[in-house]
Image (cartoon, rainbow, N blue to C red):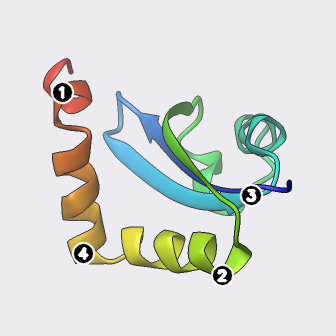
Amino acid sequence: MKFYYVYVLYNKLKNFIYVGYSEDVKKRVKYHNSGFVKSTKAYMPLEIIHYAAYSNMKDAKRREEYLKTNRGRTTLVIMLKEYFSKK
């Protein structure tokens, strides 16, 4: 079965959160940390702090789009409250 992933990257020093979608999370994170993605290049290094797998691409894309909204970001911070409290 093929999975589709929604992932969250974070840079602690700059307090930067990035939400993305990929079929290969490890490869995509390496791509981000190699400076090939314009929107994250200035925030390297990034660490993956959360990811979720979906068996349906539409569900994964819908979740990614939601997490990129203001309400979604708030949900994300609440979901990962323990992680962010360690800062």
Nearer to us: label 2 or label 3: 2
Across and down, in percent, residue 6 comes to 58, 57
Callout 1 amino acid: Glu
Measure the C-alpha gap from mark 3 to mark 4.
21 Å
Residue for badge 4: 70
Residue for badge 1: 82
Helix, strand, or loop for circle 4?
A: helix
> Residue shown at 26%/39% (left/top)?
80
> Residue shown at 58%/76% (left/top)?
59
Helix, strand, or loop for circle 3?
A: strand
Mark number, residue 58? 2
The quadrant holding residue 72 is bottom left
Nearer to us: label 2 or label 4: 2
Mark 2 surroundings within 10 Å by alpha-carbon count, few (fewer than 14), some (14 through 19), many (20 or more): few
Residue for badge 3: 22
Residue 24 shown left or right of residue 14 in the figure: right
Mark 1 surroundings within 10 Å by alpha-carbon count, few (fewer than 14), some (14 through 19), many (20 or more): few
Label located before the other in sequence (4 or 1): 4
Callout 3 amino acid: Ser
Callout 4 amino acid: Asn
> Residue shown at 77%/34% (left/top)?
26
Callout 2 amino acid: Lys
